[in-house]
Amino acid sequence: MDAIFESLPQYWDGFLRTLFLAVVSGVIALAAGTLLAAMRVSPVAALRGFSTFYVEVARNTPLTIIFFFSAIVLPRLGVKFEQFEVAAIIALSSYTAAFVAEAVRSGVNSVPVGQAEAARSIGMTFTQVLGLVVLPQAVRTVVPPLINIMIALVKNSSVAGAFFVLELFGYGLQLSNSHGDAVMWILIGVAFFYLLITVPLGLLAHFVEKKVAIAR
Amino acid sequence: MTSVLYDVPGPKARRVSLIGSIVGSIIIAGGVVGAIVILSSQGIFNASRWEVFVNESAKDVWTQLGYGVLATLQAAGVAALIAFPLGVALCLLRISLISWIRVPTQVVLEFLRGMPVVLMILFVLLVFATSPFVAVVSGLVLYNAAIFAEILRAGIQSLPRGQREAGLAIGLRSFQSRMSIEFPQAIRRMLPSLVAQLVVLLKDTSLGYIVAYEELLRKVKLISDLEPSLLFSAFFVGAAIYILINLSVSRLAIWIEKRGSKKAAGGMASAIKTVDLEVNVPGPEKK
């Protein structure tokens, strides 16, 4: 138990780094995922094909493989990183973007057909239909799954700890080496800090889901 | 579905979209060519990097990768076989009518779902001093059993209430009604989600790499440790194997979903259609 209190500075540092990884990758993944979803429903065949291919491959690749690529294979190919956080952010955001794209796409599909038809019948173009009518409505259905994707992102960021980034899990590895006699308490401390992020997010998702369910 | 978003393209739109397609393809192709140029400047396409997969030592390389695939499938298979019954049990506890069973189960499930799998694996490995295999399997079991329980609960809650009421009315006990009436239907209904979760489980076996369980990715690492120049080619082959396995299971999930919805459509939609024909009054569109 004492081991937890002794290691509080490390925990705090790791906690902040986990948050940093999750927020930066989350923002990138949201932008890239929305773009991928728009490509997926666009009239241009090449963009559709590319987006479909990317999403299918990224969703079926284990995250560890992507981390292995960005943190071990890329540097060997001459892409050097100042800090391994960059490799972690590349891996996390390229993986999460595929899931965001799928969530946004199913949100677009959940908007009633009549909405898009009405928008088109008053002469709106594809970008206007999507940007002014469909996407704003799709956001409602998309938010709860998106929060779940962000929860998964926070948990997934733990893999970075095994690829040279000192976030919560990375400190967990390090501290359990230095506190060989209190491994259990060290890891329980790490778990506590993860739950500090994931449980409130889960409650938020639940709350939003209930709110939206009444509206539709 | 997507075609609702834009008109059937006329000659002008077709031209624009063709140009867009060409420009898009050029940009994508440019990216691919750029990657290939960078790779080949590192000598990635030299035959020496790849001939290990065909020459006399190929047998050893493939054997190692084969063992890796086996270890991956073994961990995933064992974990799935234990996680599913455990998920059913947890689901039963979660929907129990007795609150001092239901509420603690809910807390445990929230806890398991909120934890990174890799942390649970490490916990089992270090605290219980098990072999990497046991650690990987237990981590996967704990996490996926919680997910299976939640999927099944959603399935049971989606059933019409009459199912359970009818079961109780003919004198079944609550547990009997759950096991012989509700679960079989919930499992069928949720089969696509359950199979999709199998893909997640399969992907998560690669976390074994972190605790030195000798699965596919660890084998790739070992090969490249012996012969550093093989890093890229070994990684490429290993990743391709992983993606192929996962894609085929994903396809299976989609196939099951399509088959299921076709059956449902055969029952429900045809009934609705006949009603429509008889009444033939276009009602207000339901949102």
Image (cartoon, coloured by chain):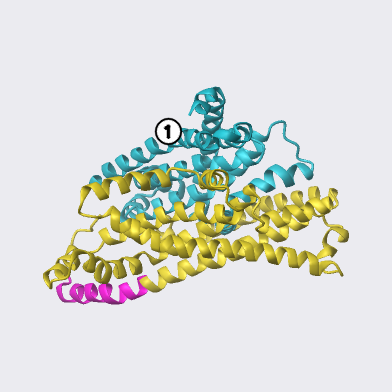
Chain colours: A cyan, B yellow
Residue placed most toward the observer, B130 or A53 = B130
Q: Residue B34, position in %: x, y?
A: 76, 49
Magenta residues, as a range? B261-280
Horizontal relation, residue B92 to residue B235: left or right: left
Three-letter code for the amino acid on which mark 1 is drawn: Leu
Q: Residue A63, position in %: x, y?
A: 59, 49
Camera sees residue A113 = no
Residue placed most toward the observer, A100 or B99 = B99
Residue drawn at the location 32% of the way across and 52% of the way down: A115
Residue drawn at the location 34% of the way across and 75% of the way down: B263
Local SS, label 1 = helix
Q: Residue A38, position in %: x, y?
A: 49, 49
Q: Considering only vertical position in the picture, is A97 above or below A177?
A: below
Subunit of label 1: A
Horizontal relation, residue A139 to residue A84: left or right: left
Q: Is residue B276 magenta?
A: yes
Q: Which residue is mark 1?
A: A196
Residue drawn at the location 61% of the way across and 40% of the way down: A160
Horizontal relation, residue B31 to residue B201: left or right: right
Q: Considering only vertical position in the picture, is A196 above or below B94?
A: above
Camera sees residue A154 = yes
Q: Is residue B119 magenta?
A: no
Q: Residue A117, position in %: x, y?
A: 34, 55
Determine which quarter of the picture holds residue A146. Answer: top left
Q: Main secondary structure of the magenta part?
A: helix
Q: Considering only vertical position in the picture, is B79 above or below B113?
A: below
